[in-house]
Image (cartoon, grey):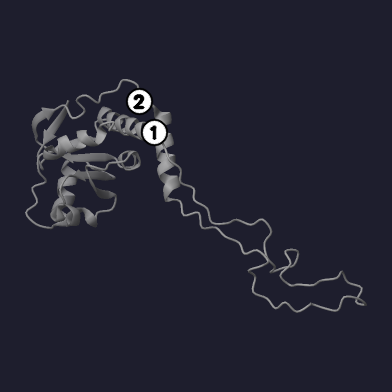
Amino acid sequence: MIPVVNSKNEKIKEVNLLEGFEVKDISLKLLHQTVVNKLASEREGNAYAKPRAEVDYSTRKLFKQKGTGRARAGSRKSPVRVGGGTTHGPLPRDYSYTLPKKLKKRALIDAANLKAGEGNIIVIDDFGLTGIKTKTMVEVLKKLGVNKSALILIGDKNEIIEKSAGNIPGVKVMNVRHPNVYDMLNHEKVIIMEKDIALFREALKWN
């Protein structure tokens, strides 16, 4: 059971947030795989070195073929010369790969259970914001026990919450319908509004 609190962190009631999604054995290996997959999909992979065909130099022969006592050389673009093209250099590539849908869903359930077990999921009835006010949001988060970072999951688009939290370092606002393992684990607290509990449970379903 997780307490439902108000903006002053006063307990109102309790709710079984993960009803039907409780797990006894949390797979840290699975969580690790999912986080690595997320980071790999965001990796740019744009390292690139020009081969000799793309190095922009004149094609003039560097010096005559015979009579200099030097090794013959036909092009400044040769990989053996300073400033020449690169042989077998890095090329742009896509590091992303796909994980099975059920595996990702199970990882999300494990992440939610892990945060709940640590007491780091907060269910709030309302932030009590009457307008866009960063200072007020900071005060609310402080009362909720947020010291480092927080992931705020909201259902419908809420400009007041989004803009009030937008400039606070370490605070991220995300749609409750699309949570991910990386952001849940990467933030100290996960904050969910009471009215969006059903949407959060829907996001945890297998299909």
Judged from this view, the residue extending furthest toward the front is 207
Q: Mark 1 points at which residue?
A: 31
Point out the image quarter for the C terminus.
top left
Is 131 rendered above or below residue 24? below
Tell me where residue 185 sits by quadrant: top left
Q: Where is residue 202 shown, x and y percent of the image?
A: 21, 35
Q: Which amino acid does label 2 sit on?
A: Ile
Is 133 rendered above or below residue 57? above
Q: In the shown orientation, is residue 134 left or right of residue 184?
A: left
Q: Where is residue 106 shown, x and y percent of the image?
A: 33, 30
Residues at discs 1 and 2 in contact (Cβ within 8 Å)? yes
Tell me where residue 206 sits by quadrant: top left
Q: Which amino acid does label 1 sit on?
A: Leu
Q: In the shown orientation, is residue 3 left or right of residue 21?
A: left
Between discs 1 and 2, the one toward the N terminus: 2
Is 144 rendered above or below residue 160? above
Q: Where is residue 5 shown, x and y percent of the image?
A: 11, 36
Q: In the shown orientation, is residue 15 left or right of residue 52?
A: left
Q: Mark 2 points at which residue?
A: 26
Point out the image quarter for the N terminus.
top left
Mark 1: which secondary structure?
A: helix
Front in this rendered view, residue 189 or 95: 95
State the residue at coordinates (17%, 55%).
Answer: 164
Judged from this view, the residue extending furthest toward the top is 24
